[in-house]
Amino acid sequence: MAQIFHPSTNTISRVSIYGAVFIIALGGYVAYRVNQASYFTDINEARQQPVPFSHKHHAAELGIDCRYCHTSVETSSFAGIPPTHTCMSCHSQIWVKSEMLEPVRESYATDKSIEWVRVNAVPDFVYFDHSIHVNKGIGCTTCHGPIGEMPITWRAHTLYMRWCIDCHKHPERYVRRREDVFKASYAPPSDQLALGRKLVKEYHIKSPREITDCYTCHR
């Protein structure tokens, strides 16, 4: 009986199968890299604001505590946006004629809020509570990045679910003493893991199995 397929067909089939696997793998890798690109995540992209507020100047150089502006961070899911009179408690005395601060003075005079551009946010279907995190020893810079180095605020992390899950699986890598939570220029100590394990017990942080349950963030 005559051979129906040319002998090279086997080779072509193998090359096609391996090639398809390679193309699928390459496509997955490219999709992953694109998904991580700053175009989609906005990482390290400074957001232009109505007033160029500098956390570097206020929090790091002047040493103003985060809670002075974000007053509800210890008691609420929302950290809070400072009302204009908080800004004017200082700027009614200093830089009173600064052109850069004209939107602040106008807001104070008209009682109309400044429309700040939000930098960090999770989707509406995700529940996030600031108070739980800071009271369990998770610092501002863990999620917001080196805020004490930001003259204009940018997003430091993707805030993707896998990024959050990594912390929930290994809280000992990130938890710090409560007195260090609001330090804008905090650096983890060399014994972070030993300290972290101790604080996980002391602060009664739930087990990774419990805090990686879907219901923790999706309610």
Image (cartoon, rainbow, N blue to C red):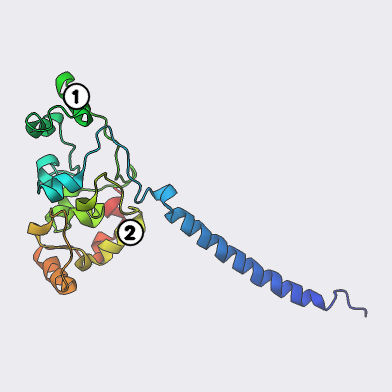
Residue 166 visible in the picture: yes
Location of mark 2 (residue): 163
Residue type beneath disc 1? Ser
Determine whether label 2 and label 1 are within 8 Å by CB: no
Percent of width and height locating residue 199:
12, 67
Q: Which mark is residue 218?
A: none
Nearest the viewer among 136 and 62 is 62
Q: Residue at x 18, y 66 (%)?
A: 188
Is 189 on the left or on the right of 26, as rendered?
Answer: left
Amino acid type of disc 2?
Answer: Trp
Give the total of numbered labels. Answer: 2
| Residue name at image x 25 percent, y 54 percent | 145
Q: Position of residue 108 (x, y in %)?
A: 15, 24
Instruction: Give the CA separation, mark 2 to mark 1.
Output: 37 Å
**Camera sees residue 74:** no
> Could you say which quadrant of the image residue 183 lies in?
bottom left
Outermost residue on the bottom side: it is 1
Q: Is residue 104 left or right of residue 90?
A: right
Please tell me which residue is depicted at 9% across the width and 33% down the height of the picture: 94
Q: Nearer the viewer, mark 2 or mark 1?
A: 1
- Does 68 appear above or below 36? above
Task: Judge whether 150 appears above or below 212 on screen.
Answer: above
In what quadrant of the picture does the N terminus appear? bottom right
Q: Describe the element under mark 2 as helix, strand or loop.
A: helix
Q: Observer-nearest residue: 201 or 160? A: 160
Q: Is residue 8 left or right of residue 73?
A: right
| Residue 77 percent across, percent down from the top left | 19, 44
Which residue is denoted by mark 1 in the rendering? Answer: 107
